[in-house]
């Protein structure tokens, strides 16, 4: 009997670990979709106005036509996640903000990756219905949220006669389901992942290429932070800490707006990347970039907040 109890216990542990393990199988967009009502869009006009909550089925939107930042958390986060809240407060000094809460459609990474296109299609429709001009839209996403940002850009362009959104800030874009090893026979089409043409400017910040984030440079401009694999100061759960550090560094860039990165090259290895500087050319990091900002850069940081130096 004791043997059976232990046997059942380990079966349960195995099932739990399997359901929450990160699969590298390509995202499957053709499965059963969540209900659109499970997506929440919370609009903040400014720091003093009462937030307005919408779903994609809302028929009346009241978003003013000015620069608006759409924040897309990772699959295991929501609108109350610490970095999301801090970023919202910081952005409201200058921009309107919309936070997308897709936590019900997110959950474990295997479910989340398959639902990214569903969330993206609904977000693109929301932006179109809200009548925010394409050149006034900035998408900021972490992990799977970064992949959603890219897919949203594609969907918006398709819905709006080729128009492109202004900026995508992709923070350590999720690798699971969106990137495979070079030697793999499986290929993920550009239509199913974040790429440089998804917006006028697509900026990628790579902080955990050894586990959670994509390794390849596929954006308009790619910043590899320190070695791009593990971030300094991350001791407990180094990979998760390094992954979310991307959001903390972008948040810091709103205050340290003149932080610079140095031109570099990146070599994609099997389980990490190798980054080295190649010239003295530098580029600003954060929202200071423009349409001519292109290439691969290494961004050096400290191991404690605010991470960036002037």
Image (tube, rainbow, N blue to C red):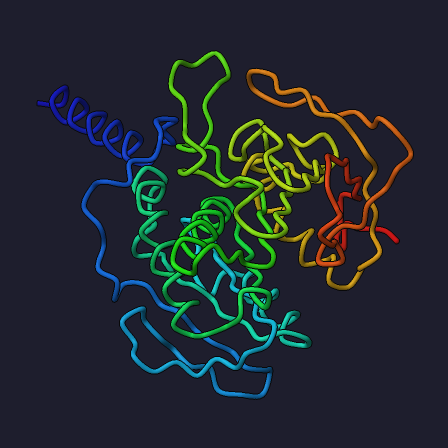
Of 192 and 20, nearer the camera is: 192
Decide which of 288, 19 is in the foreground and name it.
288
In this rendering, would 69 be left or right of 109? right
Q: Residue at x 72, y 58 (%)?
A: 252
User: How far from the left and from the top, in percent, is residue 36?
Assistant: 26, 62
> Is residue 207 left or right of 299 when viewed as pictured?
left
> Measuring 59% from the left and 28% from the top, which residue is drawn there?
216
Give the quarter of the image for residue 280: top right
Q: Position of residue 242 (x, y in %)?
A: 61, 39
Q: Residue sitting at 48 percent across and 33 percent down?
A: 175
Looking at this view, name the residue that lies furthest to the bottom: 49
Q: Residue furthest front?
A: 161
Q: On screen, 189 above or below 287?
A: above
Position of the N terminus by quadrant: top left
Residue 72 position within the rendered picture, expressed as x and y whole percent measured from the top left: 48, 57
Does 30 sit above or below residue 304? above
Residue 86 spot, x, y in % from top left? 61, 66
Is residue 142 shown left or right of residue 282? left
- Residue at 54%, 32% (x, y): give it: 214
* Left or right: where 60 falls relative to 241: left
């Amino acid at each position: 009997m004791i043997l059976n109890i232990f046997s059942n216990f380990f079966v349960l542990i195995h099932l739990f670990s399997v359901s929450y393990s990160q699969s590298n199988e390509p995202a499957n967009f053709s499965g059963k979709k969540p209900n659109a009502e499970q997506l929440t869009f919370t609009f903040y006009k400014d720091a003093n106005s009462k937030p307005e909550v919408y779903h994609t089925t809302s028929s009346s939107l009241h978003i003013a036509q000015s620069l608006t930042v759409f924040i897309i958390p990772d699959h295991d986060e929501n609108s109350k996640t610490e970095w999301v809240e801090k970023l919202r407060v910081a952005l409201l000094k200058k921009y309107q903000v919309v936070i997308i809460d897709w936590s019900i459609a997110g959950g474990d990474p295997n479910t989340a990756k398959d639902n990214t296109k569903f969330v993206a299609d609904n977000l693109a429709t929301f932006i179109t219905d809200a009548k925010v001009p394409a050149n006034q839209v900035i998408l900021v996403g972490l992990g799977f949220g970064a992949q959603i940002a890219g897919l949203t850009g594609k969907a918006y362009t398709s819905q709006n006669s080729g128009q492109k959104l202004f900026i995508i800030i992709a923070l350590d874009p999720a690798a699971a389901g969106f990137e495979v090893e070079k030697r793999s026979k499986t290929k993920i089409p550009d239509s199913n992942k974040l790429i440089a043409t998804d917006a006028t400017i697509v900026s990628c910040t790579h902080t955990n290429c050894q586990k959670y984030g994509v390794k390849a440079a596929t954006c308009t401009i790619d910043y590899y932070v320190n070695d791009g694999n593990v971030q300094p100061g991350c001791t407990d759960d180094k990979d998760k800490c390094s992954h979310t550090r991307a959001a903390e560094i972008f948040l810091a860039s709103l205050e340290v707006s003149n932080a610079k990165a140095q031109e570099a090259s990146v070599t994609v290895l099997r389980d990490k990347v190798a980054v080295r500087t190649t010239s003295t050319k530098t580029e600003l990091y954060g929202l200071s970039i423009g349409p001519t900002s292109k290439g691969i850069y290494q961004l050096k940081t400290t191991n404690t907040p605010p991470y960036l130096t002037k």
